[in-house]
Image (cartoon, coloured by chain):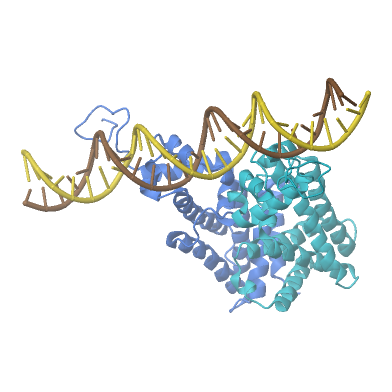
Chain colours: A blue, B cyan, C brown, D yellow
DNA sequence: GCACTATCTTTACATCGTCAAGATAATTTT
DNA sequence: AAAATTATCTTGACGATGTAAAGATAGTGC
């Protein structure tokens, strides 16, 4: 019936010296910090404060600021892929519809989490040589290639891949940056339909 | 024979108190700093050092760091447009060829000046409410709309504008960020041809 | 010649990232 | 179970940064 985590010590200590799961707490805090301050205003000490620990605590888990942002970026890529899968699950099973839905998920992620999107696609702060981040990023790229191949017939040409990826990415980047205001002002259903049309367009061979 | 700075002394003084054209020198220094350190590592004191003045000298001309980056971003937009015009000048006068060339210039700028491209399209540091920057940015947007309209027949639909802009922007952003490695590895002529094909593709109505 | 303003320097302070050393808790070893 | 070791977190310090305030110097207008 007790809510605390230590079996022998009943009273919740005000500030336990050991956090328990500081690593996860710091990633969560880092996302909040990123959303608040943006990639360029991101502060490691701010994250520590959000997590309620001293300013040097993150060092042990992530080394330095770049380490924390690298871990957050990897998590961002995983969510990015997950958002694409969600959109695909709601679409017809036809390959072309699946590819278009994946593009829709791409853009939706950028709109829903602009700070994370910018971190993973337009920042030098994460270390893209890091293995975990590298794997997460390549998983996203692999998903795209897979669907273009399924839609256009194997093997997908570099033209097809570049056209589809660029279109989805361009839409995502411009919209999440607040440009293309006319599109941002559209009702969501209408905007989604337009995104699908434009992604399909990128496939049609000239 | 003395080296100090008297107005009637023809010899170049070692360090004149008044720079002469510090504003321009600082913008130039800021570009070098941006190229060296990136948007996120950009330092105002570093710019001052490059220009050979004290660290507080920029304040009088630009207010703060954001002010300097805002001025640099405006200059970046002007060069961005200029690069598009250059590509257009080398292309056939047909509207469609002009539009495609404009897209090619878009991508070329991103590849030639990745730091400036990121500053104007993927950074919160410049103040986009600033009038000078705002005007420069809208000039770029206007150029695009103009050419899409000329190519597709007036008035250009939002679908057409979004499709063309997103494609060019996506290509530019992905390439300048070092993704789409297969495309980066292509010889320049081949890559240019591909960019033109993909931009044209974005125009074809489904 | 003199006041006034623009431009630049110096000084100062809060914040940031990072390192080093110490404190505390958990784990392993004996 | 006690001791030793390791992992985790705190404290204190340092240099770098952005910015504000005050002083120094040069150009301008009267």
**Where residue A56 appears, x then y in whole percent?**
39, 41
* Quadrant hosting residue A83: bottom right
Of C6 and A161, nearer the camera is C6
Residue name at image x 67 percent, y 55 percent: B32
Compared with A158, C9 (above or below) is above
> Seen from this angle, which residue lies furthest front?
B1
**Where residue B31 appears, x then y in whole percent?**
69, 53
* Quadrant hosting residue C22: top left
**Where residue B72 appears, x then y in whole percent?**
73, 49
Residue name at image x 75 percent, y 57 percent: B162
Of A169 and B43, nearer the camera is B43
Residue A183 visible, this angle: no
Q: Quadrant of the C terminus of chain B?
A: bottom right
Of B203 and B92, nearer the camera is B92
Residue name at image x 59 percent, y 60 percent: A102
Of A199 and A37, nearer the camera is A37
- A190 left or right of B148 in image: left
- B81 left or right of B45 in image: right
**Where residue A187 appears, x then y in whole percent?**
71, 45
Residue A62 visible, this angle: yes
Residue name at image x 64 percent, y 53 percent: B33
């Amino acid at each position: 019936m007790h809510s605390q985590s230590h079996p022998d010590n009943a009273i919740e200590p005000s500030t336990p010296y050991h956090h328990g799961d500081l690593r996860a707490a710091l990633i969560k805090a880092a996302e909040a910090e990123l959303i608040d301050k943006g990639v360029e205003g991101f502060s490691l000490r701010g994250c520590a404060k959000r997590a309620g620990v001293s300013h040097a605590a993150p060092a042990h888990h992530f080394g330095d600021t770049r380490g924390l942002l690298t871990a957050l970026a990897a998590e961002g890529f995983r969510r990015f892929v997950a958002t694409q899968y969600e959109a695909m699950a709601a679409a017809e099973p036809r390959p072309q519809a699946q590819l278009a839905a994946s593009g829709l998920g791409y853009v939706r992620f950028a709109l829903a989490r602009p700070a994370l999107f910018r971190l993973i696609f337009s920042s030098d702060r994460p270390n893209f040589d890091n293995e975990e981040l590298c794997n997460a990023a390549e998983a996203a790229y692999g998903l795209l290639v897979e669907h273009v191949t399924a839609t256009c017939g194997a093997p997908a040409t570099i033209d097809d891949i570049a056209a589809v990826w660029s279109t989805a990415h361009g839409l995502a980047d411009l919209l999440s940056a607040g440009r293309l205001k006319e599109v941002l002002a559209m009702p969501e259903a209408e905007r989604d339909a337009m995104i699908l049309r434009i992604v399909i367009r990128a496939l049609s061979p000239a």
